[in-house]
Image (tube, grey):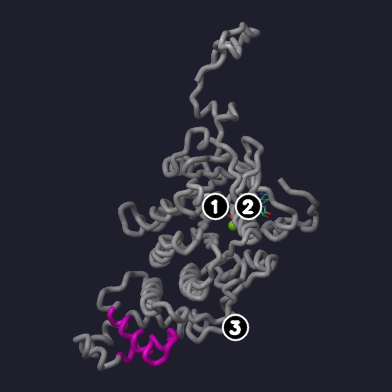
C-alpha cells in the first residue's frame, strides 16, 4: 500500500479540482503493518453476545456468545481455547463470561475445579457446588445414568476409562469382555449398579453368562483380574468412599451453574483425573435433560491432558457439543501443553490436536518468548500478532476467530472483581477496591 500520491478531489460532475498539496514522502508497508495504523483495516465490531471488554485497537465494546456467533456464521464451532502464562487473568475471563452468560440465559458446568476457585462464582449466582474429597460426605455414583437413556454403553465406557487410568494402560479385548459381562451381571442385580457391585461381579463372574459367551468361568476370572485391581482403588483404595456407593446428592438440572470442586485432592494428578472422569460422567448423566445452552469450562485443563482416557472422553463430548448446545472452554498455559499428551504421530497426540482443531475461537494471553514461534505456527498468527504476545498486559488477549482477530481488554466490574480475585494471598490490603469498572 502507498500513501502521499494524488491529492485531487473529484466534483459531483466527475471533474477533478486541485486540492492542497500534501508534501508527505511516499510510504510503503505491508497490509499487515498498516492494519495497525489504519483503523478502517481492522475487523468490524464484534457486538453479538455478552459484553467482555473493549477492543484495544478501536475502543469499541467487544461482545461474545458462541451460540449467536455460530448462528451468524462467524464461528465454525462453539468451543474456545484460552491460553496464557500464570496470573494473566485467564480464569477471571472465564468466570466473568460464565456469570454474564448466565444473565443472558445460558447455564454453566465446571466438571473439575482443581483449585476450588469457582465456588464463589456459584455462590454469587445461586448455583451448586459439589465438593468431593477427604472429609466430605458427598458421594457420587458414576454409574447412576439418567433413566430412559441407553445406560449400559456409557457405563461400560466409563468403567473402561477408569480402569485404563488406574492401570496406566489401555485394556485388551478380553478385559473389555470381562468388564462388560461384570457390568451386565451387576445390572441384573439392581437397576443402578455401583462400582462395588461391578468389582464383586469381576471377581466372581456369572457361570451361565460365561458359558453363553463360550468362555470358561476360570478364564473370565483371569481376564478380569487386572481390571478388578484397577477398579479396587475406588472401592477399597485411596479413593474409596467418593464414587463406590449410591449417590448422596440430588441435583437441580436447571441450576445456573454446577461446579465440581476437586481441590481436596490436592496435587495428586491421578486422583484428580479419576475424580474428574467419575464426577463428570455422573454430572453429564444428571444434566442430560437440561435444555439450556451450556458452557462447559475446563479450567486448569493442562493438569489433566496427560491422561489419554480422560482426553478421549473429553473429545467425544466435544464432538457432540453442537448437537447438545454445549460450548467447551479449555484453559491452558501454553499451546505446548498439548504436546505433553504424546509424541508426534501417536493416537494421544492426534486427540490433542483434534481438541485444538475443534476450538474455532482461540484467545491467547501473554506468552513466554520460547512459545512465540510454536504458537504463531499453530494458530497462523501474523508477525505483528506474534510480536504482541509477549507484551500483552494482564487481562488483555488476542482473540482469533476464523474470520476476525481482535485484541481485547477484559473489563471487570467491581462486583465481579471480588468474586474472581485469586491474588488475595499476595496482598496485605485486601479491602481496597473502589467503584466503577476496573481496567
Ligand atoms: N481484566 C482484569 N482487570 C483487572 N484485574 C484482573 C483482570 N483479570 C484478572 N485480574 C486479576 O488478576 C489476578 C489473577 O487472575 P486469574 O486468577 O484469573 O489468572 P490466571 O491466568 O487464571 O492465573 P493461573 O494461571 O494461576 O490460573 C486476579 O486476582 C484478578 O483479580
Ligand atoms: Mg486460573
Whether 197 is among the magenta residues is: yes
- In this view, 197 is above or below 313: below
- The answer to whether 137 appears left or right of 413 in the picture is left
Whether 30 is among the magenta residues is: no
- From the image, give the main secondary structure of the stretch colored magenta: helix
Residue 394 screen position, x and y as percent: 64, 46
- In this view, 109 is above or below 236: above
Residue 25 can be seen, yes or no: no
Q: Which of the marked residues, 3 or 1, is nearer the chain's N terminus? A: 1
Give the alpha-carbon distance from disc 3 to disc 1, as whole Å: 40 Å
Check if mark 2's residue and mark 1's residue have beta carbons within 8 Å.
no
Which residue is identified by label 2? Answer: 50
Which residue is identified by label 1? Answer: 68
| Segment tinted magenta in the rendering | 177-205
The tag on residue 137 is 3
Residue 10 screen position, x and y as percent: 59, 12
- In this view, 399 is above or below 253: above
Residue 128 can be seen, yes or no: yes
Which residue lies most toward the front here?
13
Q: Quadrant of residue 20?
A: top right
Amino acid at each position: 500500500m502507498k500513501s502521499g500520491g494524488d491529492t485531487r478531489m473529484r466534483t459531483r460532475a466527475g471533474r477533478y479540482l486541485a486540492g492542497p498539496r500534501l508534501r508527505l514522502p511516499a510510504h510503503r508497508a505491508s497490509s499487515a503493518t498498516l492494519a495497525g495504523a489504519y483503523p478502517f483495516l481492522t475487523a468490524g465490531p464484534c457486538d453479538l453476545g455478552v459484553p467482555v471488554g473493549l477492543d484495544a485497537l478501536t475502543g469499541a465494546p467487544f461482545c461474545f456468545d458462541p451460540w449467536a456467533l455460530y448462528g451468524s456464521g462467524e464461528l465454525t464451532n462453539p468451543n474456545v481455547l484460552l491460553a496464557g502464562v500464570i496470573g494473566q487473568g485467564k480464569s477471571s475471563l472465564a468466570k466473568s463470561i460464565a456469570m454474564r452468560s448466565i444473565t443472558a440465559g445460558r447455564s454453566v458446568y465446571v466438571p473439575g475445579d482443581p483449585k476450588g476457585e469457582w465456588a464463589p462464582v456459584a455462590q454469587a449466582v445461586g448455583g451448586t457446588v459439589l465438593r468431593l474429597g477427604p472429609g466430605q460426605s458427598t458421594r457420587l455414583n458414576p454409574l447412576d445414568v439418567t433413566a430412559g437413556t441407553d445406560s449400559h454403553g456409557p457405563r461400560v465406557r466409563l468403567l473402561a476409562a477408569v480402569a485404563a487410568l488406574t492401570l496406566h494402560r489401555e485394556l485388551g479385548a478380553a478385559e473389555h469382555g470381562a468388564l462388560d459381562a461384570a457390568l451386565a451381571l451387576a445390572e441384573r442385580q439392581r437397576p443402578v449398579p455401583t462400582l462395588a457391585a461391578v468389582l464383586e461381579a469381576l471377581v466372581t463372574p456369572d457361570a451361565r453368562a460365561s458359558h453363553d459367551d463360550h468362555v470358561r468361568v476360570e478364564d473370565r476370572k483371569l481376564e478380569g483380574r487386572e481390571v478388578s485391581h484397577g477398579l479396587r482403588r475406588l472401592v477399597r483404595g485411596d479413593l474409596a468412599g467418593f464414587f463406590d456407593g449410591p449417590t448422596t446428592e440430588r441435583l437441580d438440572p436447571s441450576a445456573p451453574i454446577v461446579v465440581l470442586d476437586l481441590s481436596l485432592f490436592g496435587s495428586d494428578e491421578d486422583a484428580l483425573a479419576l475424580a474428574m472422569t467419575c464426577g463428570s460422567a455422573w454430572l453429564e448423566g444428571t444434566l442430560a435433560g437440561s435444555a439450556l445452552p451450556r458452557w462447559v469450562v475446563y479450567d486448569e485443563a493442562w493438569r489433566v491432558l496427560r491422561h489419554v482416557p480422560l482426553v478421549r472422553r473429553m473429545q467425544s463430548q466435544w464432538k457432540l457439543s453442537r448437537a447438545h448446545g454445549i460450548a467447551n472452554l479449555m484453559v491452558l498455559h501454553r499451546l505446548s501443553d498439548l504436546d505433553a499428551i504424546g509424541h508426534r504421530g501417536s493416537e494421544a497426540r492426534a486427540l490433542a490436536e483434534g481438541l485444538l482443531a475443534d476450538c474455532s475461537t482461540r484467545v491467547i494471553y501473554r506468552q513466554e518468548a520460547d512459545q512465540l514461534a510454536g504458537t504463531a505456527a499453530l494458530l497462523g498468527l501474523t508477525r505483528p500478532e506474534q510480536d504482541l504476545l509477549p507484551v500483552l498486559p494482564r487481562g488483555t488477549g488476542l482473540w482469533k476467530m476464523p474470520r476476525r482477530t481482535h485484541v481485547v481488554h477484559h473489563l471487570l466490574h467491581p462486583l465481579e472483581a471480588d468474586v474472581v480475585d485469586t491474588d488475595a494471598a499476595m496482598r496485605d490490603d485486601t479491602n481496597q477496591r473502589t467503584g466503577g469498572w476496573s481496567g
